[in-house]
Image (cartoon, grey):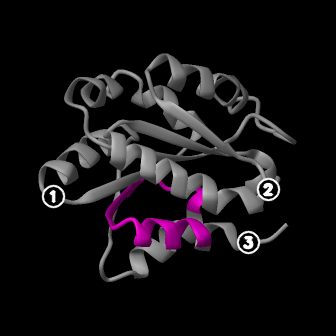
């Protein structure tokens, strides 16, 4: 397994003009978060909870900027009510979701949301794309960026647990 997929996501975000990235600290997104912090033309914003990222994306769009939200699948449930803001106001929202509760999961607390995240997002009117192999990451993120910012809708890219790797504790 390669560690290059976060670099490919970062490159796609830069090409799409994303200048704000909200995140709740997550080991699966650690490299991508570090890249965003190191980029002078991006503002990486640590959030206390994932739903704040929906508001961050709304504010960015109103201010003429583009934003993305990084989270783990366990944070999807925290965002469901806040996603009504996106649905009613029709601003672009790109969420990059590292999945837990799937392949080789050891933590029983991660399984419930990991198994329901995709269905919950679809019920909230979010377009869901998925990348389980490194070769799929960049084209999937680029397509999601096109949909989110072109159609001004919510799109989530689920980064499968096989891609992010087995957690070691």
Q: Which residues are magenta?
A: 8-29
Q: Residue at x 44, y 20 (%)?
A: 124
- Give the CA separation, mark 3 to mark 1: 32 Å
Name the foreground residue: 107 vs 152.
152
Q: Which residue is mark 2?
A: 165
Query: In the rendered view, would you say 137 is above or below 73?
Result: below
How many residues crowd mark 2 within 10 Å: few (<14), some (14–19), many (20+)?
Answer: some
Q: Residue at x 76, y 62 (%)?
A: 135
Query: In the rendered view, would you say 32 is above or below 23?
Result: below
**Residue 82 appears in which quarter of the rendering?**
top left
- Give the CA separation, mark 2 to mark 3: 10 Å
Helix, strand or loop at disc 3? loop
Q: Is residue 30 left or right of residue 55?
A: right
Q: Which residue is mark 3?
A: 3
Name the foreground residue: 142 vs 168.
142
Q: Is residue 66 magenta?
A: no
**Residue 157 appears in which quarter of the rendering?**
top right
Residue 24, visible in the rendered structure: no
Which image quarter is the N terminus in? bottom right
Tell me which label, 1 or 2, sits earlier in the chain: 1
Q: Which residue is mark 1?
A: 64
């Amino acid at each position: 397994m390669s560690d290059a997929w976060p670099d490919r996501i970062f490159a796609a975000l830069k090409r799409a003009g994303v200048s704000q990235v909200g995140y709740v600290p997550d080991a699966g997104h650690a490299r991508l978060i570090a890249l965003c912090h190191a980029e002078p033309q991006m503002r990486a914003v640590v959030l206390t909870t994932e739903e704040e990222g929906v508001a961050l994306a709304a504010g960015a769009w109103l201010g003429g900027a583009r934003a993305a939200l990084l989270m783990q699948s366990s944070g999807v449930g925290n965002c469901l009510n806040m996603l009504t803001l996106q649905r009613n106001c029709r601003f672009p929202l790109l969420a990059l979701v590292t999945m837990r509760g799937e392949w080789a999961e050891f933590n029983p607390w991660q399984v419930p949301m990991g198994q329901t995240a995709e269905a919950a997002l679809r019920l909230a009117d979010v377009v869901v794309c998925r990348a389980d192999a490194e070769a799929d990451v960049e084209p999937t993120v680029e397509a999601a960026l096109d949909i989110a910012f072109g159609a001004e809708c919510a799109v989530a890219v689920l980064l499968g647990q096989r891609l992010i790797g087995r957690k070691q504790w």
